Amino acid sequence: MVLIHLDSGGDDHGYVPHPMWSFQKEAKFCPVLLFKLNSLPTETFTSQGMLIPFLMKNCFQLLCTHKVPAAGFKNAVKSGLILQSVSSDVYQNLAVEDWIHDHVNLEGKPILFFWRNTPSLVIGRHQNPWQECNLSLMRERGVKLARRLSGGGAVYHDMGNINLTFFTTRTKYDRMENLKLIVRALNAIQPQLDVQATKRFDLLLDGQFKISGTAAKIGRTTAYHHCTLLCSTDRTSLSSLLKSPYQGIKSNATQSIPAMVKNLLEKDPTLTCEGLINAIAAEYAAHHQIDHHITFINPTDETLFPGINSRAKELQTWEWIYGRTPKFSISTAFNVLGEQTPLEIKVFLDIKNGRIEICRIEAPYHWLPLEIYEKLNSGLTGSKFCPVETTMITHMLLRTCPEDQELHSKWNVLCEKIKGIM
Amino acid sequence: MAAARVLRTWGRSAGRLVCVRHFQACSTGHILKPKCLCLLGFPALKYNHPHHLLKTTAALCGQVVQFKLSDIGEGIREVTVKEWYVKEGDTVSQFDSICEVQSDKASVTITSRYDGVIKKLYYNLDDIAYVGKPLVDIETEALKDSEEDVVETPAVSHDEHTHQEIKGQKTLATPAVRRLAMENNIKLSEVVGSGKDGRVLKEDILNYLEKQTGAILPPSPKAEIIPPPAQPKDRTVPIPISKPPVFIGKDKTEPITGFQKAMVKTMSAALKIPHFGYCDEVDLTELLKLREELKPIALARGIKLSYMPFFIKAASLGLLQFPILNSSVDENCQTITYKASHNIGIAMDTKQGLVVPNVKNVQICSIFEIAAELNRLQNLGAVGQLSTTDLAGGTFTLSNIGSIGGTYAKAVILPPEVAIGALGSIRALPRFNLNGEVYKAQIMNVSWSADHRIIDGATMSRFSNLWKSYLENPAFMLLDLK
C-alpha cells in the first residue's frame, strides 16, 4: 500500500487548478489506496510498473467522494513516490520536472523520478550553447538541444544515460545524501565497485572516471536535485558533441568542466540500465520506508499534469533554448581566397538574448565594396544569431545587390563563413 | 497624509468618532477625497481592483522594506546573480519571481515576500550576492502579517472580523485580498482558498460573494461600485450597474529586425521597377483528370504529385518562345541579360517567413523530376534547412497563393527577375463548352506582373496564352515537350 498526497495549490501565474487536484483543507491527508492491477487496460509495462494514469483517476474520484478526516493517518505511514517516464523526449521529461516542482506539495512525501532520452544535449540554465557544444554537428546528426531550468554544466543524453531527479521540500534539500544513496545502491548490487561522491557532487568510478554529474533547482518551497548516471552511453558521440569548435567567444555564462568518463557497463557487464534503476529504486524505498514499486507516468497526459504540454512546447522554442543565453561577444577571423593570396576577414559580434546587437565585419575593400559590408552589417543587426535566419536574410539582401557574378559568389562565400560560426 | 497613518494605528476601537475627526481635519469645505470617504466608512465600498487601491495608498504612506537574501541551504553563503526578472519601478506581488541566482550548480528562484514596488536593486548581473544581505528594496503598503492595515468601517461592528484568524491558524492572503474581504464582511476562514498553499485569492472572494448574494459583480478593473449609503449591515443584492466596456489595450512599438528588415529593403528595391499586371483564367478540367491518373504512379515512386510541376513545366516551355521573360536587367536598365537556364522559383510560406527556392534547369527536366525536386525543397523548407544554392540563381517565379486562398493577386517582382506569376485557387464554376452547353469547369485565375521597361503587354499576353493552352489541353504540351 502506498500513501500518496499530491496537492496542487495552483501556481502564482494565473494557472487554474484542475478540479481533480484542488482539495478542501479537511481532505488534505486522505489516504489513497493504489491497487496493483494484473490486467492493465491499455499500455503494457515491465513487471514492476503500475499504470498511474488509470489509477490516479480512480483514486482521485475516490478522494473526492470520501472526505475522510485523516488526523489519525498523518503520522502513521511514511510516504513517497518512485516515478519513471515512459517518454524518451527530452523536452517532455524536462517539463515533468518543472511541473512537479511547481505543483506538488512534497511535505513528507519526496519523489524520485527516473528518465532517459533519445540523443540530446542538455545545457544548464545559464549556459551558452555556442561555448558548450558543436551545434553544427548536432544539426547534422539530428541531436536535440535543450536548456534545463537547473544550473550546472552541459551533458549528453542517450538511452544509455539514466537521469535521476530527487524532489524534496526546500528544507529537506540535501544533494550529498542523495548521492550517498546512489553509492549504497550500486554497492548493494556490486560490492566491489569503487564509486565515490566528490565535493563537487560528481560520482567517480575508480577514483578517476566521472560517471555522474549533478545540477539542482531551488524554488520557494520545493527543490530538486538531478543527476546523470553513465550506464552504456555512446562515449564517442559524447566527446565529439561536447567539444565546441567556435572560437573567440567571451562570456560570463557558466562553463562546463570536461572530465574523463566511463560507462558502468564497461566496468561490469551486469550493470544494465534496468538493473541500476531497480537497485536505486530499492535503496530509495528502503531509506524512505516506502513501497519500492516504480510507477510509470506519461508526460503528455494532460489530465494528470494539466498544462504540461504547453510547458514542453515552451522548452522547445528558440527563445528559450538560444534566446536565454547570457550576453556574450564573439571576436573571430577567417580566410577567404583573394586574387593571389588568402585574405583575412575579421568579424566582431555582440549578442544579447540570442540576437545580434552589434555586427562589424572588417574586410579589405578591394575584395568587396564598402557598401556591401555595410549592407551585411545592417542586415544582420537585430536578427537571430541563427544560420537559418541568416540564410534567409542574406539571400533576400542579395537581390538588392548589383547583378555581378563575381560579387554574388564572394557574397555567398562570406555568408557561408559567417554562418559557420553560428 | 501622516494623519491617516497615526489614526489607523490607535483608532481601532474608536470607530466612527475617529473617522469623523479625521474628516474634519482634512477637508475644510472641499470635496471629499476618496480616501476620506473610505475612512468614513461607507459600507460595501468595493474596489474591484485591489491593486489599484494599493497603488494610491502606497504613494501616501509606503514603507521601504529591505528584502534580504534568505538562506539557500547547504551552508551556502554567497551566490551569483544570473538574471533579474524585475527592474526598479516594477510592481510585484507576493510570491512573484524577483531574480535567479546560481550557486554551485544549483539555480535558485528568489520570490518576493511582499506586495509593492521595487525601489532598488542591490546587484548587477554576474555580481556576487550574500545571504543575509539586502537583495532589493521594496516599497510596501504594509507588512504581510500585520493587523494594522485593517481599515475601520462602522458597519463592521463585530471585532472578530478584524482578526481573520481561525483556530490559531492564519489564513494566507495578501493585504489587498484581506481588505476586499473586510469591506464585504467576509470571514477569510469561510472562503476556500484556491491559491498556492491554500491562499485565498481575489477570485475566491468574488466567487464566495457570488454564491452569497446570487449576483455577479462586474469584473471591469477600473469600475467602482458605490451603492446607496443607507444599507449598513444586511448583504442585499448589489445592483450591477452596466458600464460601457473599457478597453485597456496598449499600442506596442518595436524595431523591425531580422528577416522583416531584409524584406523591407528588397521590396523597396522591387517597387522601383515599373510593374504592369495581366490576368486571365485557365480551365484546368483536363489537367485535373490527368493528375488523378498520374498521382498513384508518382506515389508508387515515392513522390507526391501536385499541380505545380505542370505549371512549372508549361512556364518553361513558354519561356523558350519568349526568352525576354527569363532575363535580367542591370541597375540602370542599360544592359539586358537573357538567362540560359530556366531556374523557376516557387514562393513558399515557412515558419521563418517567405522563402523562394528554385528548381534548376527546368528546361531539361521531366515533370516527374520537377515533382521530385519540389518535394525535396518543400521538406527542407518546412524544417528551415534550405541551402544558399537552393535559394540563389532564380530567373522566373511562380507564387501559388491559391493554396491558401484567393483569385487574383498583384505579385511583386523579385529582383533581379523581370516577371512573376501568382496563381489563385482552383474553383468549380459553370462554363460553356464548344457546343454551347454548360458544364462544370475547374477554373484557376492567374495574375502576371512584368517589368514594363523591357516587356510589353503583347508579349506577356502571348506568353500567357501559350502557357494557358498547354494547361487546358495537356496533350498539346506533349508536342513541344523537351
Image (spheres, rainbow, N blue to C red):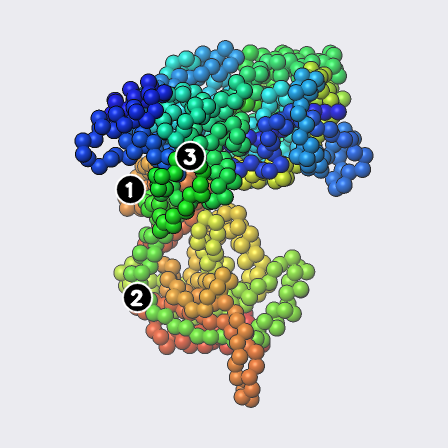
- Residue A204 numbered mark, or none: none
Which mark lies nearer to you, 2 or 3? 3
Residue that extends furthest to the bottom in the rendered view of this protein? B435
Residue that extends furthest to the right in the rendered view of this protein? A38
- Using the image, name the chain to which the residue with label 3 belongs: B
User: Residue beneath label 3, please?
Assistant: B233
Residue pictured at 47% horizontal, 59% vertical = B346
Residue type indicated by callout 1? Tyr
Label 3 vs label 1: CA separation? 85 Å
User: Residue beneath label 2, please?
Assistant: B274
The mark nearer the N terminus, 2 or 3, is 3
Residue type indicated by callout 3? Lys
Which mark lies nearer to you, 1 or 2? 2
Q: Nearer the viewer, residue A420 or B98?
A: B98
Q: Is residue B260 left or right of residue A3?
A: left
Which mark lies nearer to you, 3 or 1? 3
- Using the image, name the chain to which the residue with label 1 belongs: A
User: Residue beneath label 1, please?
Assistant: A365
- Check disc 1 and report its element: helix, strand or loop: loop
- Check disc 3 and report its element: helix, strand or loop: loop
Residue B216 pos. (x, y %): 46, 45
Q: Nearer the viewer, residue A364 or A90?
A: A90
Residue A248 pos. (x, y %): 40, 28
Residue pictured at 43% horizontal, 20% vertical = B145
Residue pictured at 80% horizontal, 37% vertical = A39
CB-based contact (under 8 Å), mark 1 and mark 2: no
Using the rendered image, report if marks 1 and 2 lie on a common chain: no
